[in-house]
Image: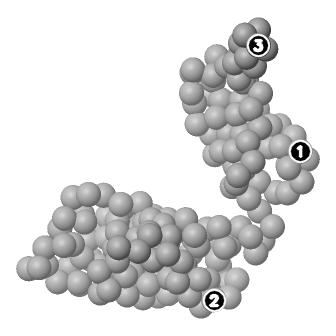
Amino acid sequence: MAELATIARPYAEAMFKAVGGDNAAALAEQLEAIGQVSGDAQLRQFADNPKVTAQQVFDLVSGVAKVTLSPKIANLLSAVIENGRLFALPEVAAQFRTLVNASSGVSDATVVSAFPLDAAQLADTVVTLEKRFGRKLNATVQVDASLIGGIRVVVGDEVLDTSVKARLEQMKVALTQ
């Protein structure tokens, strides 16, 4: 079977070309919502049932997603269901978001912190990170107490790790050499 990214890429690129930059961010949110729903194992099992029609699967996905689907997203969802590619929808959403971000000069950043960050701390951190990485960032925060303190930031394939855990590992390596 072809790799998931290979299956998802044509759908994401076709959707991006169809959108042409109009409301791409809003459509990305809709696509992510239905992608998240379609990632559910029970939903996939329901969709794979030969007694279930494509319209029933469409109605279930769009109903559970709790978003009003634009005609373009609805057409994409129909095409994915009819072609038996519902399993690829989360990857389609991720690749579409990457295309939208690339066209607008924005990158997604994951900030992993030892403690929850309030809105002001996150805003200050994002401003500093945007200067460091040289581009606008959409930041999401995850909490990982094992970091002990500090943060780890992942932007694409770049990682900035200023956590206490990383510093302790560096000291451990330096002392054992």
Image quadrant assignment for residue 48: bottom left
Q: Which residue is mark 1?
A: 132
Viewer can see residue 31: no
Mark closest to the chain's N terminus, 2 or 3:
2
Mark closest to the chain's N terminus, 2 or 1:
2
Image quadrant assignment for residue 113: top right
Q: Nearer the viewer, residue 50 or 174?
A: 174
At label 2, which amino acid type do we have?
Lys
Q: Is residue 125 left or right of residue 68?
A: right
Residue 36 horizontal/vertical position (percent): 41, 60
SS class, disc 3: loop
At label 3, which amino acid type do we have?
Gln
Q: CA distance from mark 2 to mark 1?
A: 32 Å
Q: Which mark is residue 17?
A: 2
Query: Which residue appears at 77% of the width and 38% of the height?
Result: 160
Q: Is residue 50 above or below residue 137?
A: below
Q: Is residue 89 above or below residue 169?
A: below
Q: Is residue 28 above or below residue 40?
A: below
Viewer can see residue 2: yes
At label 1, which amino acid type do we have?
Arg
Query: Which residue appears at 69% of the width and 44% of the height?
Result: 154
Q: CA distance from mark 2 to mark 3?
A: 54 Å
Q: CA distance from mark 3 to mark 1?
A: 31 Å
Residue at the outermost bottom position:
18
Q: Is residue 123 above or below residue 102?
A: above
Q: Which residue is mark 3?
A: 177
Residue 142 horizontal/vertical position (percent): 58, 36
